[in-house]
Image (cartoon, rainbow, N blue to C red):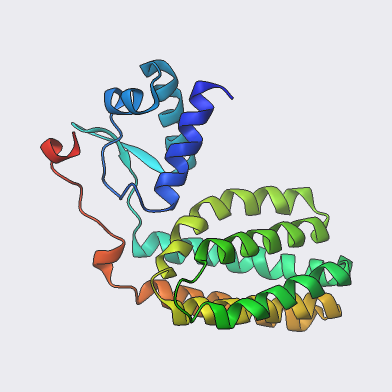
């Protein structure tokens, strides 16, 4: 793997997982020392993150992690509703029933686990990503898949805001299971309706998350290193 690719993927994961907070400076010197590479591949990685919308240039500070605003979240969900609902209908029309029956069973089994101690949230998010890939494959529409891929990069970041709310995670797993069941049964209308319910609940969960947990002020230059 090229040095710039390695840095890009690591920084992207840190941003999506909220290990790097909005407004935090992504200094070339600091990051080059962290990865043990020169500043040129770091500069390339930062350019890619900026193109993705995960980072942005800030006058006097260089490149910083991009902010996430309520307006951003609402705009993302407006697009998500259009894409996800269409994808659910197409998946129900063209699906492999066995694949989605299996996903539904796994999701239903996860619901109770998400309420318990030591919850494997990473495993749940991996399962959701598998369902996303299954829907992409079932739709058999490369243009829709490409549009979804770009959107999901930002949704992954927003989705992690619910990780401290086990009740919401459990409900989301149940909602995903309903979608998977509807797709397995070939019911386009129910798949779309279940998707709309899930999106409405997800948006409400994000909008009611305390602002201090996700919209972070930019740290002082001295603190940012």
Closest to the observer, 60 or 129: 129
**Is 173 situated left or right of 51 in this image?**
right
Q: Which residue is situated farthest in the front direction here?
A: 118
Name above or below for residue 44 compared with residue 166.
Answer: above
Name above or below for residue 39 compared with residue 53.
Answer: above
Name above or below for residue 222 compared with residue 211.
Answer: above
Q: Can see residue 48? A: no
Spot occupied by residue 48 in the image (x, y as percentages of width and height): 48, 32
Spot occupied by residue 22 in the image (x, y as percentages of width and height): 30, 50
Closest to the observer, 166 or 120: 120
Query: Residue drawn at (51%, 57%), measured in percent from left and top?
Result: 156
**Is 131 situated left or right of 17 in this image?**
right
| Quadrant for the N terminus in the image | top right
Spot occupied by residue 204 in the image (x, y as percentages of width and height): 43, 78
Name above or below for residue 64 compared with residue 179.
Answer: above
Query: Residue drawn at (77%, 82%), measured in percent from left and top?
Result: 189
Query: Residue drawn at (51%, 58%), measured in percent from left and top?
Result: 155
Spot occupied by residue 12 in the image (x, y as percentages of width and height): 46, 42
Closest to the observer, 85 or 185: 185
| Quadrant for the C terminus in the image | top left
Q: Can see residue 5? A: yes
């Amino acid at each position: 793997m090229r040095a710039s690719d390695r840095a890009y993927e690591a920084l992207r994961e840190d941003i999506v997982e909220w290990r790097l907070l909005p407004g935090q400076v992504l200094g070339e010197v600091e990051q080059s020392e962290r990865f043990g590479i020169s500043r040129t591949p770091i500069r390339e990685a930062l350019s890619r993150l900026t193109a993705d919308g995960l980072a942005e240039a800030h006058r006097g500070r260089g490149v910083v992690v991009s902010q996430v605003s309520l307006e951003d979240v609402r705009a993302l969900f407006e697009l998500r509703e259009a894409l996800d609902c269409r994808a659910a209908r197409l998946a129900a029309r063209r699906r492999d029933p066995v694949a989605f029956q299996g996903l539904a069973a796994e999701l239903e089994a996860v619901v109770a686990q998400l309420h318990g101690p030591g919850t494997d949230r990473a495993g749940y998010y991996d399962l959701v990503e598998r369902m996303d890939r299954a829907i992409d494959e079932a739709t058999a529409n490369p243009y829709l898949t490409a549009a979804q891929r770009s959107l999901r990069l930002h949704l992954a970041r927003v989705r992690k805001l619910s990780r401290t709310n086990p009740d919401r995670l459990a409900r989301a797993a149940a909602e995903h299971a309903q979608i998977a069941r509807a797709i397995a049964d070939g019911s386009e209308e129910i798949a779309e309706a279940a998707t709309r319910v899930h999106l409405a609940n997800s948006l409400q969960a994000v909008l009611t998350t305390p602002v201090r947990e996700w919209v972070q002020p930019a740290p002082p230059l001295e603190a940012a290193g």
